[in-house]
Image (tube, rainbow, N blue to C red):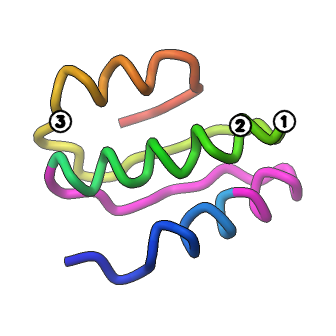
Amino acid sequence: LLIWSPKDIKTLIERSWRAGQQVSIHTIGDAAVETAVRAAREVSADGVLGRLNLEHVQVMSPQTVQLMKPFHVTC
């Protein structure tokens, strides 16, 4: 169940990283993990970097693992 839009997730990641805070997102399922990682990639493409914690990661696709590689991600 997606509670926040991908745009809102991106906005909150950006605000948090600009404030020097880590971001934790509850992600059960491969679609949830991919949505969070894609939002973080968009933020980092704008030059804002930070740490991303993905909670309850149980399943993710190999493609999502590749998207995660340039980040500081904790699962």
**Quadrant placement of the N terminus:** bottom left
Q: Earlier in the sequence, mark 1 or mark 3?
A: 1
Residue 59 appears in which quarter of the rendering?
A: top left
**Mark 2 secondary-structure assignment:** helix
Circle 2: residue type: Ser
66 falls in the magenta region: no
Question: On the rendered image, what quadrant is the C terminus found in?
Answer: top left
- Name the one closer to the observer, 11 or 73: 11
Q: Using a 10 Å C-alpha cutoff, classify the residue at mark 3 as few (fewer than 14 neighbours), some (14 to 19) or many (20 or more).
A: some
Q: Is residue 61 above or below residue 16?
A: above
Identity, as a three-letter code, of the amino acid under mark 1: Gly
Q: Give the residue drawn at x 84%, y 35%.
A: 47
Residue 44's disc number: 2
CA gap, disc 2 to disc 3? Answer: 21 Å
Disc 3 marks which amino acid?
A: Met
Discs 1, 2 touching: Cβ within 8 Å: yes
Position of 13 with respect to 62 (left or right) is right
The secondary element bearing badge 3 is classed as loop
User: What residue range appears in magenta?
Assistant: 14-29
Is the residue marked by circle 2 packed among few (<14), some (14-19), or many (20+) residues within 10 Å? some
- Mark 1–mark 3 distance (CA, rounded to whole Å): 26 Å
The residue drawn where x is 58% and y is 38% is: 41
Residue occupied by mark 3: 60
Tell me the residue that label 1 is attached to: 47
